[in-house]
Amino acid sequence: MDAHYLIELFFSGLTRGSIYALIALGYTMVYGIIGLINFAHGEIYMIGAFTAFIVASVLSIYGFSSVTVFILTVLAATVWAGAYGFTVERLAYRPLRTAPRLSPLISAIGMSIFLQNYVLLAQAPDFLAFPELIPVFELPEALAAVTGSTDLVILAITAAVMVALTWLIKFTRLGKAMRATAQDQTMALLLGIDINRVISATFVIGSALAALGGLLIASHVGQINISIGFIAGIKAFTAAVLGGIGSIPGAVLGSFILGLTEAFAAGYVSSDYEDVFAFSLLVLILIFRPAGILGKSATEKV
């Protein structure tokens, strides 16, 4: 195995990690706000990808340029998935917010099953060919030998999203309200923060990011079916736990570690064992760091 192959695997791992990060952020944001896992998040990712598939197919009929199709498809997929995220929060979580913790968990699993079967009725269970939406451009010969332009576009979009999300959380009114709600919902309510609006906004943002990830990976792979949400959801949840569930930097770090682990396992051992290496790494990390790499151990108030 030469250095050329090593760099190729490195870029492949970064691309995987970028997609996992976009999905994992939704898990970790929701957990950070309400302390629960949104198990319907993978299906939101899948719905975003199918929305992109439908919109891109319609737009291609009218002869729009590839860049225009990509931009309009991203907007449609993220807005539509955001609407689903808002609905999931209102139907599966808000009515059960004061119920025992097991109740919203079961409700979220039920919503996940419902959404998957809902799409199954509207689409087909088989794999469908997904159009190539990501703009393609020429790279210098040395760079083109180890990666493709679509990989770099995915990395650039993910980096831009991370910067924008960091700015939103640190410097905007909504971001400050999110941090206050995550720290203490009762105190945030007493200070005049509408925690229902903040929680809904968190679901919407997380769902939009998942839809963006679904669009990018479906375009990169070139196919789509109704089961992609389950697989990607499990991987992204693993990445969020690996980095420290509830920590946004942890979700990003865990995603890239998971993506690189899978890429090198597939390249040097076998693609059949990439999941074995990924979950073995998770077990090892949790043995020595139960809260994850950047997670903080919860302190019980007395």
Image: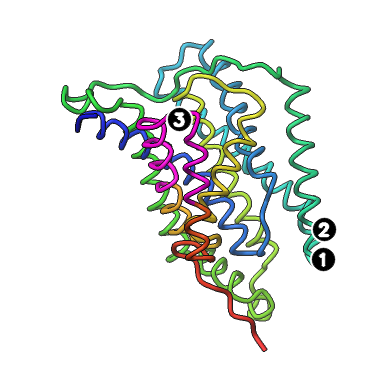
Mark 2–mark 1 Cα distance, whole angstroms, equals 6 Å
Is 177 in front, or is 253? Answer: 253
- Relative placement, left or right, of 63 versus 93 is left
Residue picked out by circle 3: 71
Marks 2 and 1 in Cβ contact (< 8 Å): yes
What's the residue type where badge 2 is placed? Ser
| Mark before the other along the chain sequence, 1 or 3 | 3
- Residue 22 in picture, x, y percent from top left: 49, 44
- Residue 151 in picture, x, y percent from top left: 35, 31
The coloring applied to the image is: rainbow
Task: From the image, give the main secondary structure of the stretch colored magenta.
Answer: helix
Q: Quadrant of residue 267?
A: top left
Marks 1 and 3 in Cβ contact (< 8 Å): no
Instruction: Please give the range of residues in magenta.
Output: 256-281
| Mark before the other along the chain sequence, 3 or 2 | 3
Residue picked out by circle 1: 100
Looking at the image, is mark 1 or mark 3 nearer the viewer? 1
Q: Does the magenta portion include 196?
A: no
Label 1: few (<14), some (14–19) or many (≥20) C-alpha neighbours in 10 Å: few
- Residue 238 in picture, x, y percent from top left: 55, 49
Identify the secondary structure beneath mark 2.
helix
Is 278 in front, or is 218? Answer: 278
Mark 1–mark 3 Cα distance, whole angstroms, equals 42 Å
Identify the secondary structure beneath mark 3.
helix
Q: Point out the image quarter for the C terminus.
A: bottom right
Q: Does the magenta portion include 275?
A: yes
Residue at (58% x, 16% y) in the render: 58
What's the residue type where badge 1 is placed? Pro
Give me the disc on residue 103. 2
